[in-house]
Image (cartoon, rainbow, N blue to C red):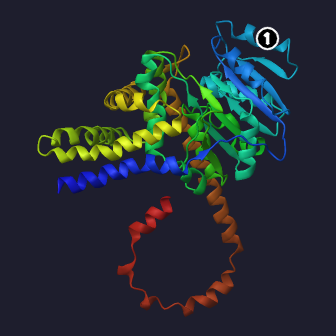
């Protein structure tokens, strides 16, 4: 009985990663039929180690119709000077000196808000400063967006991993994503449950961006990329996520501590789970890997349960462009660090200890603002509903209603069959 249950559970868990390998959209070299003007928007805070390489790759694009706007978000290093050096050689780059962060905004959202206000493009490419592009990347992204007829395209970069500290944590980003999110359903379904994006590379139409409310609508979101995808799908827009191995690269972090801080920002919040269900899921995930080894002492054939898990890891490594041998050898370590990083993310969020780029993110204050916004929206809809009811009430022909009233046989209605609780719940909704 244990064998059958474990086989079913492990196969189901592994099947998502395997399914993504065969169905996930890949960004491939292509040329668009049209060449709309693109605003490449780069928020940068203390990015002196990355911004020059990023901009150098941007200006090597074989796509002719674009502008570059960089927001120096109150950097304390040489980020601004490096950007200014590019203005000497390129006329289509603009530097914005970021304004102080206002209350009620997260840093990146505020920088992006300032960028989009200056942008002139028909399309916006929101690009992180640690991303590098191959010369065909922008044209290929525009072509894919055009072919799939979507409002937003988010490309998952191929992660550049150099140090052992990075190897412990960075592969978890692609592994977790490909193991628990069916990327094909993000594009094919209208459900907001299948919403995901990565802020390192988002190509979105100006029209859809403004319709969504821009970053003004996302100002308190920590995982603003996922929130953007949810809002777009809620409004009926189609979105697409694609793997961009070979065309878009990113070195997210350079050491273990930076990776730990970065992952703490979005692992728990990105799961959209309550703490209890989140912990249960973590324990279950750990058990799936540990149980086959424990049950090995009962009978050796229990180790066969590792086959689908290993196959899934091989395929997710292939689609991510990562070293397969390294990921297989580090699989037990990655399982341990998945648990460690996930618990740390929960601790950081619930303990209001989150910070990034030298700024503390006050989650308690943001949560209070979110609650106030929700309350205001609720009151607005309530007021509008009452007004609509009064309008309908005035339109009722009461004389006509009096003619119909005798035709209703009240004795034929069985009041016992009416579920008043159900009616009350629907009314509350």
Residue drawn 70% across and 52% down? 148
Residue situated in front as seen by the camera: 284 or 371: 284
Q: Is residue 357 above or below residue 20?
A: above
In the displayed image of the protein, which residue is found farthest to the front? 325
Residue situated in front as seen by the camera: 419 or 115: 115
Q: Is residue 195 above or below residue 409?
A: above
Q: How many other residues sit within 10 Å of disc 1, few (<14), some (14-19) or many (≥20)?
A: few
Residue topped by disc 1: 84
Residue situated in front as seen by the camera: 35 or 213: 35
Residue 310: x and y, percent? 35, 41
Residue 61: x and y, percent? 78, 29
Residue 193 seen by the camera: no
For residue 273, side relative to residue 377 (left or right): left
Residue 366 seen by the camera: yes
For residue 132, side relative to residue 166 (left or right): right
Residue 28's image quarter? Answer: top right
For residue 71, side relative to residue 282 (left or right): right
Residue 173: x and y, percent? 47, 32
Residue situated in front as seen by the camera: 368 or 234: 234
Residue 289: x and y, percent? 28, 39
In the displayed image of the protein, which residue is found farthest to the right? 91
Residue drawn 29% across and 55% down? 8
Residue 154's image quarter? Answer: top right
């Amino acid at each position: 009985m244990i064998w059958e249950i474990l086989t079913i559970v492990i196969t189901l868990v592994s099947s998502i990663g395997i399914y993504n390998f065969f169905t996930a959209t890949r960004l491939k070299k292509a040329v668009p039929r049209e060449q709309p003007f693109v605003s490449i928007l780069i928020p940068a805070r203390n990015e002196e180690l990355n911004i020059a390489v990023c901009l150098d790759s941007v200006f090597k694009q074989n796509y002719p119709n674009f502008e570059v706007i960089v927001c120096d978000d109150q950097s304390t290093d040489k980020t601004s000077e490096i950007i200014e050096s590019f203005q000497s050689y390129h006329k289509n780059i603009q530097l914005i000196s970021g304004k102080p962060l206002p209350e009620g905004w997260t840093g990146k959202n505020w920088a992006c808000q300032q960028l989009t206000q200056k942008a002139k493009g028909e399309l916006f490419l929101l690009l992180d400063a640690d991303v590098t592009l191959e010369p065909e990347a922008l044209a290929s992204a525009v072509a894919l967006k055009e072919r799939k007829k979507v409002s937003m395209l988010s490309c998952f970069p191929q992660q550049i991993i150099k140090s052992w500290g990075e190897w412990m944590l960075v592969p978890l980003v692609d592994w977790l994503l490909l193991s628990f999110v069916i990327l094909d359903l993000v594009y094919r379904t209208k459900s907001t449950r299948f919403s995901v994006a990565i802020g390192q590379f988002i190509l979105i139409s100006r029209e859809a961006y403004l319709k969504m409310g821009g970053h003004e609508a996302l100002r308190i979101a920590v995982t603003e990329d996922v929130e953007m995808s949810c809002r777009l799908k809620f409004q009926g827009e189609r979105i697409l996520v694609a793997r961009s191995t070979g065309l878009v690269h990113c070195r997210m972090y350079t050491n273990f501590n930076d990776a730990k801080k970065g992952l703490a920002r979005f692992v728990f919040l990105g799961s959209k789970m309550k703490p209890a269900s989140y912990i249960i899921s973590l324990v279950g995930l750990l058990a799936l890997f540990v149980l086959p080894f424990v049950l090995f002492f009962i009978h050796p054939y229990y180790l066969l349960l590792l086959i689908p898990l290993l196959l899934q890891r091989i395929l997710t490594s292939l689609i991510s462009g990562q070293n397969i041998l390294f990921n297989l050898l580090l699989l037990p370590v990655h399982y341990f660090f998945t648990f460690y990083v996930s618990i740390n993310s929960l601790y950081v969020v619930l303990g209001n200890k989150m910070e990034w780029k030298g700024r503390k993110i006050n989650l308690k204050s943001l949560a209070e603002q979110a609650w106030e916004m929700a309350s205001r929206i609720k009151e607005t809809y309530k007021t509008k509903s009452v007004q609509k009811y009064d309008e309908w009430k005035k339109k009722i022909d009461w004389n006509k209603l009096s003619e119909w009233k005798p035709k209703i046989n009240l004795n034929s209605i069985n009041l016992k069959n009416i579920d008043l609780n159900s009616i009350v719940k629907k009314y509350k909704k």
